[in-house]
Amino acid sequence: MPPVTIYTTSWCPYCKAAKALLSKKGVAFEEIDVETGPGLRQAMTARAGGRTSVPQIFIGETHVGGSDDLHALEARGELDKLLAA
């Protein structure tokens, strides 16, 4: 399974929803709270092609997008394939 990284903030309901879906599926992930260190949001924005909102989710080097994007992948049955790649 490729590594999963999720950029978050502690107060974001969309971040919580995305983490809940990943946890429900038994997926381990690295969480980076962009408010805990200087430059973290800037690094996320650069990696996410300019997107500044949280969460920003990566599976391996693939940028999934936000919580809605993650849930849409799950609804289409494509999330498991991406996680298995």
Image (tube, rainbow, N blue to C red):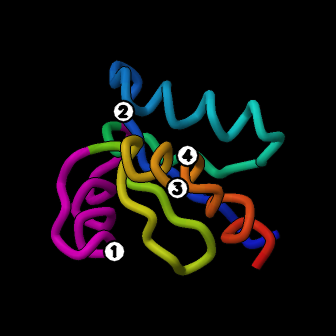
Within 10 angstroms of label 2, few (less than 14), some, or many (20 or more) residues?
many
* Residue range of the region highlighted in magenta in the rendering: 36-53
Relative vertical location of residue 71 with respect to residue 41 in this rendering, above or below: above
The amino acid marked with disc number 3 is Leu
Question: Horizontal placement of 12 versus 71: left or right?
Answer: left
Between discs 1 and 2, the one toward the N terminus = 2
Of residues 41 and 39, which is closer to you in this image?
41
Is label 2 in contact with label 4 (beta carbons under 8 Å)?
no
Q: Residue at x 43, y 71 (%)?
A: 63
Q: Secondary structure at mark 1?
A: helix
The residue carrying mark 2 is 9
> Could you say which quadrant of the image residue 46 lies in?
bottom left
The amino acid marked with disc number 1 is Arg
Residue 78 position in % (x across, y down):
62, 63
| Disc number placed over residue 75 in the picture, else none | 4
Is label 3 in contact with label 4 (beta carbons under 8 Å)?
yes
The residue carrying mark 1 is 47
Q: Residue at x 51, y 36 (%)?
A: 18
Label 2, label 4: how many angstroms apart (C-alpha)? 25 Å
Indicate which label's residue lies in the foreground, 1 or 4: 4
Is label 3 in contact with label 1 (beta carbons under 8 Å)?
no
